[in-house]
Image (tube, rainbow, N blue to C red):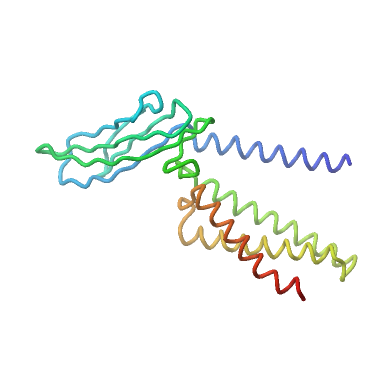
Amino acid sequence: MRQTFKKLAIALAIILAVLIANYMIIGKTFTYQMDNMLDSYVSCEVIPESEDALRVVSAEYKNGKMYATIKGLKTGYTKAEFIIYGENGEYSSRLASFYVHKSGIITMNGYVGTTNRFYIVGIEIILFFLVMLIHRIRKCIRTQRENMYSYALVGHLGVAIFLFVTFVFFTLLSIRQGTTYYTLSILVTVLEMIFTLYAVLSVPILLV
């Protein structure tokens, strides 16, 4: 019992440390990038839908792009218009929607949208499944030595196969798309696809 509580405490401490690290890396600001579609540039600005919900920290232009940093002031959905002004009265604008979480983190395009520096979560997922896979393989080896035909070995092998498939899938996705590809909604969708695929592939094996 004491060993179980110790493992649980260690797991909770690791999760808490990861959450704090993610919070510090992602931060409470969101930097929006907008390409200049005009032939010239004069100035740029950000117009929040509600100044009570969003505050413009900075708006600058460099290398043909507008970089606008905003900070959330009130939890909930809000919008902001990003405008680049050119010569002769020309301008280019884009309206973006945001959600300000209670933690202060801002996600774009919904509650489970994208946020700055979210790539850290993609890296953590790959490392998590790798560690879990190694741990499960060790359990399989230990159980196989004790009883080759036990139900426990079947269970460990099933979990190990699922972890392996998930690890390979996320690794290949990260290599192809890059870890900056990840958003909350994409992570949820990918995990749903993996669970569904694993469940379908497991049915024939379970029947046998």
Residue found 63% across the figure and 60% down from its top: 195
Of residues 13 and 70, the one nearer the viewer is: 70
Which image quadrant for residue 66?
top left
Looking at the rendered image, the quarter that the N terminus falls into is top right
Going by the image, does 20 lie left or right of 115? Answer: right
Residue found 61% across the figure and 62% down from its top: 196
Of residues 67 and 201, the one nearer the viewer is: 201
Residue found 40% across the figure and 33% down from its top: 78
Looking at the rendered image, the quarter that the C terminus falls into is bottom right
Of residues 200 and 64, the one nearer the viewer is: 200
Marker count (numbered)? 0
Which image quadrant for residue 203?
bottom right
Which image quadrant for residue 92?
top left
* Percent coordinates x, y for residue 50 in the rendering: 36, 27
* Percent coordinates x, y for residue 150 in the rendering: 87, 67
Q: Check the image and report above or below for 180 versus 141.
A: above
Going by the image, does 115 lie left or right of 144? Answer: left
Of residues 87 and 52, the one nearer the viewer is: 52
* Percent coordinates x, y for residue 18 in the rendering: 62, 40
Q: Check the image and report above or below for 99 versus 113.
A: above
Residue found 44% across the figure and 33% down from its top: 29
Q: Residue furthest left?
A: 88
Going by the image, does 112 lie left or right of 20? Answer: left
Q: Residue furthest bottom?
A: 208
Q: Residue furthest top?
A: 52
Going by the image, does 146 lie left or right of 105? Answer: right
* Percent coordinates x, y for residue 197 in the rendering: 61, 66
